[in-house]
Image (tube, rainbow, N blue to C red):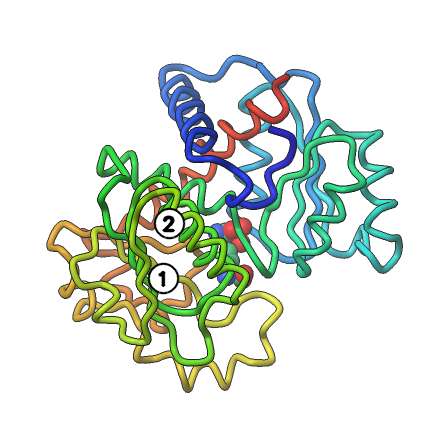
Amino acid sequence: MEHFLDISGFSAGELWQIMHKAKELKDEYFAGGNKPILKGKILGMIFQKPSLRTRVSFEVGMLHLGGEALYLSPAEIGLGKRESVADVARVMSGYVHGIMARVFDHEHILELAKYSSVPVINGLSDYSHPCQALTDVFTIWEHFGRLEGLKVAFVGDGNNVANSLAIAATKLGAHFSIATPPGYELPEQAMAEIRQAAAEGGVDVTVTHDPVEAVSGADVIYTDVWTSMGQEEEREQRLKVFPPYQVNSELVAKAKPEAIVMHCLPAHRGEEITDDVADGPQSLLFPQAHNRLHAQKGLLALLLGK
Ligand code: CP
Ligand code: NVA
C-alpha cells in the first residue's frame, strides 16, 4: 500500500485488511487506549477547503497512535499557486512521514502522489472521497455484519461521495443504486470504474432519476449535500432541481423497514435530509461520523506504520 488516492486502486482483500485493522484499533482504543505504533511519525495535512471531520479525525487519530499531525490551512500553502504542486510534494516529503490533502482539483492529488516520496492520502477532491467511503463500508459492516448481498442506495448529486461509496460498496459485494436529477449523474469515468467494481463484486448497479426506484428494497439510504464545496455559484440553480430528491420519512418508508440512513456530513438540514430522518431511529449519521476516526486509524497504521 503506497498511497490512498481512490478506492478503485484497492482490491476487496485490501479494503478488508484496512477495515479489520480499523476494527482492531477501535476495540483496543475502547479497551483502554491505543499503543503508540506511530511514535515519531508526523502527518502533514494540506487543506484547500474547510473541514471538521477530516481535519479532527486525522489529527486525533495520529495522536491516539502516538504520532503527530500538522494542519496547513487554505491560506498557507497556495497549492499550485504560490508554488507548484510537484514542489510542494518534494518539499513536504522531507519534513513529514505522510501527506493528507483536501483539494479542489483531483489532478492535484495525483500530482502530489507522483512527486511525493511519502504516502499521500486523498482527504477529498472534486472527484472522490475515499476516506469517507472507507468509513461508510466499515460502518455498514459494523451494523449489518456484512456487505455482501445488501443494497446501498444513494439519492442526490452524482458527486465525489457517491462515486467513492459506489466503488467501495460494490467491490465488497453490495448492490448499488443511485437516483440523481437529470444532468447531475455521476461522470462517465466514475461510472466506468463503478461498473468494473460491480463486476468484481458480482453485483448490480442501478442508475435512475427516480428516488423511489433507487431506495426500494434498500438496506442503506445515503445522501449528501446538493451543492458541494467549490460549486457555490450553482447553489440557486441546484435548489430548484433537487427538492424531489430529499431524503424524508416518506422516502425512507419505501426502503426496507430495517434500513439505515447515512450522510457524510456536513448536512444542510431541510434540504437533502429532514431533521426527523437525520435524528430518527434509522439514522446512523453520528456513529458514521465518529467512525472516520477509527477507519482512518486502520489506514494510517498500514500506510505509516512500516
Ligand atoms: N465528511 C467530511 O469529510 O466532513 P468534513 O468536510 O467536515 O471533513
Ligand atoms: N460532496 C461534499 C462532501 C463534503 C464532505 C463536498 O465535496 O463538499
Which one is nearer the viewer's eye here, 227 or 125?
Answer: 125
- How many circles with numbers are drawn on the protein? 2
Residue beneath disc 1: 223
Between disc 2 and disc 1, whose residue precedes?
2
Q: Quadrant of residue 200?
A: top left
Q: Residues within 10 Å of mark 1 (few under 14, many from 20)?
A: many
CB of residue at label 1: within 8 Å of ligand 2? no
Residue beneath disc 2: 198
Q: Taking 254 as reference, is 31 above or below it?
A: above
Cα distance in 3D space between marks 2 and 1: 20 Å
Query: Where residue 9 sits in the image (x, y, percent)?
Result: 55, 41
Q: Quadrant of residue 29?
A: top left
In the image, taking residue 280 as reference, residue 18 lies left or right, namely right
Query: Where residue 89 sits in the image (x, y, percent)?
Result: 81, 41
Q: Residue at x 68, y 32 (%)?
A: 119
Q: Taking 289 as reference, is 119 above or below it?
A: above
Q: Amino acid at mark 2?
A: Ala
Q: Quadrant of the C terminus?
A: top right
- Of tags 2 and 1, the one toward the viewer is 2
Q: Residue at x 26, y 39 (%)?
A: 148
Return the mark for residue 101.
none
Query: Where residue 53 sits in the image (x, y, percent)?
Result: 51, 46
Which one is nearer the viewer's eye here, 263 or 280?
Answer: 263
Q: Secondary structure at mark 1?
A: strand
Q: Secondary structure at mark 2?
A: helix
